[in-house]
Amino acid sequence: MRPMASLPVVGDWIKFVGGGRFQGSQTFDHGLELRLGQVGYVHSIPGSRGDFGCTFGPLKVSLDHGDIQPSAVPSIVKQESERCEQLREAELPRSSKATFRDAGHPLRSVPFRLASNNRTATKRAATRMRTAALTPSQSRPPMTGSPLKRPCSLPSLQGRVPGVVAEDASETSEPTRERPHPPSFYCPISRQCMHDPVILSDGHTYERRYIEKWLLHKDTSPVSGAKLPQKSFVPNHALRNAIEEYFEQVLSRHREAIQHTTAGLVKRHGKFSCNSAILSTIDSLMQCSILLNADLSVEMVLKRLMDEAKGLVGAEVASVFLVDRQHGELYSTVNSTGKEIRIPFNSGVAGSVACSGEPLIIMDAYADARFNTEIDRKTGFQTRNILCVPIRAFKAGIIGVAQLINKTAGGVLSREGEAARAAQRLAFTQDDQLFFEVFASQAGSAIISSGVSEEMPVPSSPSQQEGTSSEEPMSAQSSMKPLATEAVLVDATEELEEKMLLLQPVLDAAMESWSADTLTLSELTRGRPLYVMSLSVIRHLGLIQAFGLDEAKLKRFLIEVENGYPQSNRYHNSAHAASVVHFMYALLVHGGVALQCTKAAQDVQEDMQVKFVQLAGILAALCHDFEHEGVTNDFHNKTLTERSVTYNNRSVNEQHHIAAAFRVLMKSDMNFLAGMSSDHFQNLRSLIVEMVLATDMALNNELLAIFAQSVQALGAEGFSPSTAEEASLVLKFALKCADVGHLALDWPGHLRWVQRLEEEFFLQGDREKGLKLDPGFLMDRDKPGVSQTQVGFFDAIVLPLFRSFHQACPRAKPMLERVESNYADWKTLQRRVKA
């Protein structure tokens, strides 16, 4: 299938045709089917991989150009639009009518009006509920919110409130027809609600950050395409104030409608938590809040959601804690302290809910053993009661918790008479819990949609975390024990030992193979592939017994080093480090490099030389990208980072990796090499440092020339180093080959790593553009990236590297064969693309 001629925008109707990411109809593991010819619409703009978020009925899926084609607006949507417009025409006086047109939206003409003060209209808006989910063949965006964005659904409520329609049928029988927001609020470039609008010389208003990016490379108007007389722009303060005032008015109307409806329901039924009208209006309120913050960070969106929850339910403190599975912690950037808070995963009230997955209402905090009173004593704040609910995501399970502290009488859900009883001890109710779960559901949608669960960087060591003392009440209410305590460490290592037992067949197979799927290993070990792979290799080689290593300290060291590989990095993460460890093991053992390079350990007794070289090689691989920040040396040097200044622009990343790793090793509770003699340790350290520094690709050509010259006179059995320097050179190239070992994986595994590297490079390019710098080579997502330049990369770098290494180490032939096979596949792919 041919891809779309132009990029679709949010709200465009599209048809699934396959031919891109997916071939033919697809059935997903949750039972939903995506059929060829099925009509849906785009709900999100291209992400970092150039894909589009598309909705087909209840199914949300990421597709690329080749999977979709433009589609006409389904007849059911046209009928609904016409009916809504007729109803509005009949409802509004002529003086208050207005229409606008948006060429980017399937519904070309959409009625619009500002909020009315009419009580009937307000009540009607409050009682509108979303129509039932359509079948895939009827999929359409609901007529709600912005004409450019389709609000999230509330999957957590589906099926939970079975009788909602029948209870107040008279109030909910009207079709959904909520008003869109003014089109002038949307940036023509991003098609998202503006926060910092500026006026360009073409007379149009744009979001500042998007027009700045546009003007970096273009001198034409994004709207008309005409050449700009000048590139300057000025803030549009009037529009900014209008946007803020408008949304505050809209949000206020929702709150008033909720309060009005709940008061009547309490009088008639004594309850309101099972009324669909209120749930719909709460959802509308949150959608307005999310829309207003659509282009802000996920932390800001969550903060606004929690502010609404705090005001709606009535509470003094609101917070969100997200799960950091890699470190076994909960962390919060949305809380009352204004700082990042971190707590052990199973600690306190928040930890209890995260572990159990069940909502929790604590009537008397001081009477509950899970509550930590020390924080209140330090801050002077008094916690009375707590409402805590889990934040769930499909497949990912529990991704966090949302928490309210101290019920107040000031919420819009408060019953009549509560204000008069403010002096009494108020407590959260089941109604509060249900409403708060609605907010938690929206928070989960915001988190998953933003990708924050995968991409948000988290501090990797206690030194990077904020202290827990504060003048503000800390909403975590936990003991705040540091993660690295002896008890927690023992629990972590014991759990990992159990996982290693379960994975032993996989690990045994890896020890006999030239390749290992460490991305899958990362999933199976919940983000601990480096620990598991490294410990398995060290044990398999018998290095603990050979050198009398302290295994407890070794485990601490491995955990700390793995913590130093940010999982937010798409490529330079602990799965990459685990892959390098395995490839280095394969070269040392299957490739015979350890036996070939014993001269590198000439001061070590002869029967220990092979083991010594193996230990040096594995430790170098283990630490070679420690604390990598996902950016290149060139980026550090151009932006004069602290690392660049420290290492004078020379192999900045590599020098930091090895220096930081040895700082960890020098800690008394992690120095598993403390029993090694000083001479042997210095020899080991020298080998590791030299190997890691050689991974700087800027030195590749220079080192390759030296290496090729050294192996010119090799014989049939390969290169036999005669000096420590020559042996060290072979080890350097062994690590260089292992560092790009994904080139020697099978095609699917290799392709996954190439895509990850491209994503990481493009993210750096985005940062460079934001700093008004020219993106480095392969970093600009508007130009060919890694996946489009592989043939040239193989020709210039990869093949000379691996062929020279094979010439020196003939037993590494399986690695070279796989590299050449992937090279052939890239050339075939290139020919097909050109054809």
Image: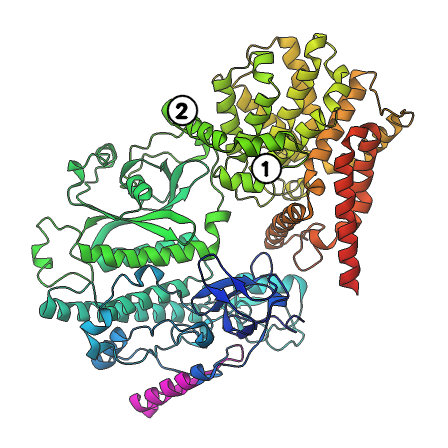
Q: What type is the residue that disc 2 sits on?
A: Val
Q: Are marks 1 and 2 in contact (CB under 8 Å)?
A: no
Q: Residues within 10 Å of mark 2 (few under 14, many from 20)?
A: some
Residue 69 percent location from the top left of the image = 60, 73
Residue 659 percent location from the top left of the image = 61, 26
Residue that protrudes farthest toward the right in the picture: 713
**First in residue order: circle 1 vs circle 2:** 2
In space, the residues marked 1 and 2 are separated at their CA atoms by 27 Å
- Quick one: SS at disc 1? loop
Residue identified by numbered label 2: 490
Q: Residues within 10 Å of mark 1 (few under 14, many from 20)?
A: some
- Looking at the rendered image, the disc whose residue lies closer to the viewer, 1 or 2, is 2
**Residue 434 visible:** yes
Q: What type is the residue that disc 1 sits on?
A: His
Residue identified by numbered label 1: 628
Q: Is residue 103 magenta?
A: yes
Residue 568 percent location from the top left of the image = 53, 44
Q: Which residues are magenta?
A: 79-104
Looking at the rendering, which quadrant does residue 441 occupy?
bottom left
Looking at the rendering, which quadrant does residue 119 occupy?
bottom left
Q: Is residue 237 found left or right of 615 in the rendered image?
A: left
Q: Is residue 704 found left or right of 114 in the rendered image?
A: right
Residue 574 percent location from the top left of the image = 56, 36
**Residue 650 visible:** no
Q: Is residue 184 above or below residue 450?
A: below
